[in-house]
């Protein structure tokens, strides 16, 4: 195995999809010696043309460097590769930087497997597009033992200068990244639902876009206010109560229904507000919906 040189670390990358190729390219551009393996050879060859060292097997990629980034569709793909290529025997002394999106159980099982075979694991979630890697918008959430994260730091910094250390609980990047995905996912699903309602009501989407942007400009401030209110348990003071929000959402549902659009999203929102009312939260701030979503209520 190559020694890890801090100035221009050498590294292997397993999995060269959109994200894995972006990771490998960013590391090559930063001057790293990068060995790459992918199931489909074409993606290996494209990076070899840019200076990477192509590996014929994932075992070769593991043997080539002490630090190995893994970025695949899911953990099932990685487990299949481990099994088919009998990779366990190559984990000892290797730092696996696992950047595949995972579920909590899969992430924990994987951590146990790597540890059992003498490997060291840094598990993370990529919170940006491949094009953002190596720029100031590159974002990585990482967890692992302090010495492992220290050892991976030069590589992580190349990908995301201000990568986030979430400590040694390996499931934290998965949890935080999914919590963030709910946030952005709901906003984006909402805007697409809004286009359906606007179109069904003959509102030109250019007009919808202009006003969606205006309305959206309050989002950052409101998000911060809501998170602080939940953090501080201060959900009683409000300028717009849950009952008032619920009435607004009923109006949305009624209009969506009159226009003949699909009500699947409005029905889900209606259920949330009904549960809040059942919990006696009608006079509280929207932040009190946290009680509806809390584990105790699930
Ligand atoms: N793309 C993004 O913007 C983005 C952003 C944040 C996080 N992520 C995460 O990054 C990870 C990779 O995403 P991606 O966008 O790079 O996906 P992708 O473009 O679909 O690439 C998937 C990769 O997994 C490999 N793969 C899948 N099944 C396999 C199997 N059974 N055996 C061997 N290799 C297998 C593919 O190999 P082949 O090339 O041979 O098919 C390819 O290298 C995911 O966990 C994703 O959630 C992606």
Image: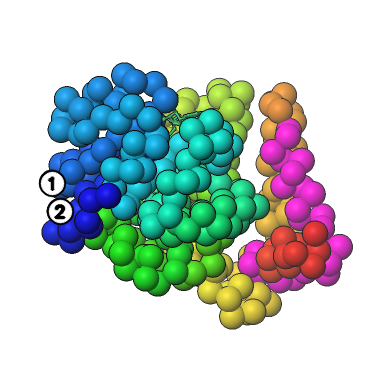
Element assignment for label 1? loop
Instruction: Give the number of the disc on residue 245.
Output: none
Is the C terminus in the top left, top right, bottom left or bottom right quadrant?
bottom right
| The residue stretch that appears in magenta | 263-287
Answer whether residue 42 is magenta in the image: no
From where the camera sits, is residue 182 visible? no
* For marks 2 and 1 on the same chain, the one whose residue lies earlier in the sequence: 2
User: Mark 1 and mark 2 in contact (Cβ < 8 Å)?
Assistant: yes
Q: Residue furthest front?
A: 89
Would you say 173 lies left or right of 63 here?
right
Query: Mark 2 = which residue?
Result: 8
Answer whether residue 272 is magenta in the image: yes
Q: Residue 127: where, in percent of width, then height?
A: 41, 50
Would you say 138 lies left or right of 209 here?
left
Element assignment for label 2? loop
Residue 190 lies in quadrant: top right
Q: Nearer the viewer, residue 296 or 14?
A: 14
Q: What is the C-alpha distance between the residues marked 2 and 1?
A: 6 Å
Q: 61 above or below 199?
A: below
Magenta region, main secondary structure: helix
Q: Nearer the viewer, residue 32 or 112?
A: 112
- Residue sitting at 18 percent across and 61 percent down? 6
From where the camera sits, is residue 248 visible? yes
Instruction: Give the number of the disc on residue 31.
Output: 1
């Amino acid at each position: 195995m190559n020694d890890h040189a801090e100035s221009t670390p050498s590294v292997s990358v397993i999995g060269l999809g959109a994200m894995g190729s972006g990771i490998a390219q960013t590391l090559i551009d930063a001057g790293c010696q990068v060995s790459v393996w992918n199931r489909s050879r074409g993606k290996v060859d494209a990076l070899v043309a840019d200076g990477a060292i192509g590996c014929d097997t994932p075992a070769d990629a593991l043997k080539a460097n002490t630090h190995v980034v893994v970025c695949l569709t899911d953990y099932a793909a990685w487990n299949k590769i481990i099994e088919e290529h009998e990779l366990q025997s190559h984990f000892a002394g290797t730092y696996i930087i696992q950047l595949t999106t995972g579920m909590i159980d899969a992430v924990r099982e994987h951590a146990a497997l790597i540890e059992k075979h003498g490997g060291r694991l840094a598990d993370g979630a990529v919170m940006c597009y491949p094009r953002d890697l190596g720029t100031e918008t590159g974002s990585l959430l990482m967890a692992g033992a302090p010495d492992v994260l220290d050892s991976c730091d030069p590589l992580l910094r190349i990908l995301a200068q201000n990568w986030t250390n979430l400590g040694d609980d390996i499931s934290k990047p998965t949890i935080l990244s999914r919590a963030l995905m709910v946030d952005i996912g709901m906003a984006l699903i909402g805007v697409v639902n809004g286009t359906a309602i606007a179109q069904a009501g003959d509102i030109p989407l250019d007009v919808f876009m202009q006003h969606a942007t205006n309305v959206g400009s309050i989002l950052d401030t409101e998000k911060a206010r809501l998170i602080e209110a939940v953090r501080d348990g201060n959900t009683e003071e409000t300028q717009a109560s849950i009952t008032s929000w619920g009435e607004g959402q009923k109006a949305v549902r009624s209009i969506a229904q009159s226009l003949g659009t699909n009500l699947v999203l409005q029905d889900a929102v209606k259920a949330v507000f009904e549960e809040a009312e059942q919990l006696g939260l009608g006079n509280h701030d929207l932040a009190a919906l946290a009680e509806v979503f809390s584990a105790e209520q699930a």
